[in-house]
Image (tube, grey):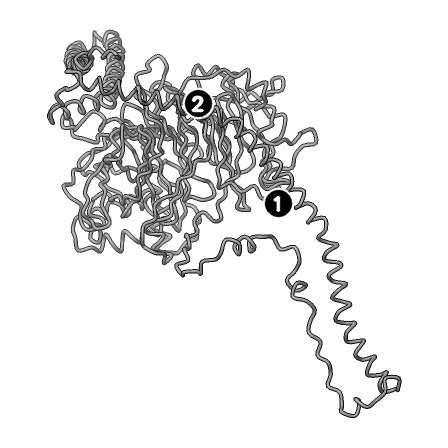
Amino acid sequence: MRITLDPSSDPTPQPKRSPLSVTPKDELEWLPLPKHPLFSASRAAAAAPSSASSKNLLAWDGASRLYFWDRHASSLHRLSLRLGDADPTSVLASSPSKVLQADVELGFDVERISINKNGTAMLLLGSNRLSVMYLYGRASKKDVNLICRTITVGPETYSISSNNIRVLQALWHPYSDTHLGILSSDSVFRIFNLAVDPLLPEQEYYLQPAEPGRSRNASSVCPVDFSFGGEHLWDRFSVFISFSDGSIFVLCPVVPFGSLFKCESLLEIYNDAHTFGLKSANSLAASNSKLAISWLEATFPELKNQEAEGDNHSLLRANAYAIFDASLVLQGPLRRVGQGGNEDSFGPSVECEGRAVSFLYNLVSKDSILVTAWSGGQLQIDALADEVQPLWTVGSPPRLRVDSCDQIRGLAMICESTAIDRLERLDHNAWLGNPPPLLRLAIVDLALSRRAESSYSISLFSDTLMPERIYSLHDGGIDSIVLHFLPFTSQTNGKDDTMRTPSVHPVLNTCQSGCTSEPSLCGFLSLSDSFGYSWIVAVTLSQECVVLEMKSWDLLLPVSIDTEKKPIQAEGESKEREKPTIISKELLSGPKEVLVPQAAPSLRSVASDSIEGRSTLHQYFKLFHETYVEYAHKVYLELKHHAPQLNKIINDQHSRLGDAQQKLLKVEEKESLLQKRIERVTQMHNSLEERLQRLRNLPCAHKKPLSRAERQFKSELDHFRAVELDALHSSVDALNERLRRHMQASTNASRQQQRIAGKKGGAGEDQMSMLKSSLEKLTLVNTENSKKVKLVESTLKNKEKSSREPSLPLL
């Protein structure tokens, strides 16, 4: 494996800094992280390669503890870190590591791990199941390891027995330590409150991006990834969801019950809704803002008292609340606008290939950045051109689950998208119910080698120290993308409005001979400390660890170009100026000029052996001694001081001269071999040209090109094979899973009806007939979908058979 370091990493020594870690124990040994026994050569040799899927088995609590999931031992390793101790470029880890094991059998392969905000729980995520391990909960010692309490999240929804529903993404909510957001392949976004009930979801949002029967394609209704919003206005209550066709939708507001928010941030959006919405002359804007204000006052009751009485609350807790006659709108798809406002589109750009595979929301100062990764190796970077605002559909009540005290314990709602024909002007878009438009910042092509059969799996991460930097983890390694232009931030800081393209730097290259193969990394994270230093940590499938220090202080500085013309210098003069300074310029300029004091005319007739003559001569000697003798002494000391340096430079030049002579001898030896190889290549080139000319003269070579309709049909078939077919399979699997649940529920209902058949016989028969009719309808829908999938597969097979022709023999 060839590893290439980032040129932006700065290896120069820097001053010592105090470690950012807890006080180490006496029995612990501190080693560089790449040399830790957990990542030793013996363990790396014993590690077997795993399946080629996107994995991230590293996690960091943001302070001093790093976690690594050992997939072979099914255990979690905890390491204490010292960042920049003894050397700013080093990352030390404690040895031995603390091993944490689950108290139950997981029953699935862990693909990703994630730690919550306060570092007390670790999410263990698989393809169709997920569990949570409590790191500091009820743990008992067994041998040396710690046995930690582990729970399964949503076992009835996400289980191995019914693997038709896959977990696409699971994230901890940024404003709660116990709430978990999960997006699954059945187009449902769920929020679980692990402190209350890890079995049932607290909130369920059934996503419906298109009207039933009017979807453009299957990929437009298949979600891919999601991300919670950042600390900016209504973004903190937003969930951004990406679909396979590249379209982005927003759910707002979504708040976990019992989560904490800053009071000053809530007052800002509360006053904004009063100022720009409630007092607006537009009735639609006033109605939308009124709903938002009522939701804020009901969710945060102290907010109204805070505004009226001026109570001092730093944090406010969200109450369980939902508008009883309205459901959230799935805002989108977000449309793109150009700088001149002449563009109005959504989904993929012409430069993007394949389907969307991952999504990232990143907040940089006042700009909300949305990054979409495509399976063809491109990154689509957009920025929100307007603020996200809440939106409801009145007349579509949600389903609520309440307790005996009529307190809301859970809710579920269907979120439908709103169709917008065109974008309104940004100046008059406040509280009108229009989703925020996107401003295209850049399309970044990672220049990955082409694949004929499979697509790329790309993961996105943001830098913990510099939010302008984004890391992309793909099959070929790791790349760093730095954004130099941010619309609102650049305008606020008074920078030039000209758009600068992002800079892309390869950080880690895991390709062999420039050929991108299967994924070779199973862990990645970004570290930073309070001194402004940043590192990245990567772990390979062979369990080798790589630590790189990342330079961040000068990446955002503008490039200064000197437009003044400088005089052309001779080659010899430029070489002289490049030589290092050995002797100071003060000594090279010579001694200072001695100003001889003017003598009176009477001294010219004075004898030198007289008292006046001796006094004058003594004064002259003293002046010359202070000037020339001291200068000579300085020259002597300077030459004596620089003698070892000059000797070192001479020895270095002699060694370099010897190396150059040896290289010249090797080149002379290989010259004859190179000449022979060039002659053979020339002959082979001529032979291939002759064979190509013969093939061109064959009658079969002049085939009729495809017509425009045939090319369009071929592109549609390729799109179906690459994107739509997987989406159809996912939809059929989700329908099968819903049908299985419905049949199970109907079986349980029939058993209950048999028990009370004597009391309610007639009502039971009616319910059974309704259930049978609904089952028949679901069976018909499932049959039709299966026929469509088989039709698409048969069309693809016929197209492949028709396109295959016997290969031409080489003459």
Image quarter in which the C terminus is found: top left
Residue under the image location 74 percent in, 71 percent down? 627
Picture quadrant where residue 191 is located: top left
Which residue is more in the foreground, 93 or 674?
Answer: 674
Nearest the camera: 653 or 282?
Answer: 653
Q: Amino acid at mark 2?
A: Lys
Foreground disc of the pair 1, 2: 2
Q: In the rendered image of this protein, does residue 71 appear above or below residue 368? A: above
Q: CA distance from mark 1 to mark 2?
A: 59 Å
Mark earlier in primary sequence (1, 2): 1
Q: Residue 52, image x and y in percent?
A: 40, 19
Q: Is residue 374 among what the camera can see?
A: yes
Q: Amino acid at mark 1?
A: Arg
Percent coordinates x, y for residue 804 in the rendering: 20, 13
How crowded is the residue under tag 2: few (<14 C-alpha within 10 Å), some, or many (20+)?
A: few
Image quadrant where residue 656 sits? top right
**Disc number for residue 74:** none
Task: Write the residue at 43% across / 32% down.
Answer: 478
Local secondary structure at mark 1 = loop
Snapshot quadrant of residue 757: top left
Question: For mark 2, what is the residue?
Answer: 676
Please state which of residues 403 and 191 is positioned toward the viewer in this rendering.
191
> Mark 1: few, some, or many residues within 10 Å (few <14, many ≥20)?
few
Q: Which residue is mark 1?
A: 17
Question: Is residue 175 in view?
Answer: no
Return the x and y of residue 126 as percentages of the image width and height: 40, 21
The image shows residue 357 at horizontal and vertical percentages of 32, 28
Judge from the rendering whether residue 656 lies leftward or rightward of residue 796; answer left or right: right
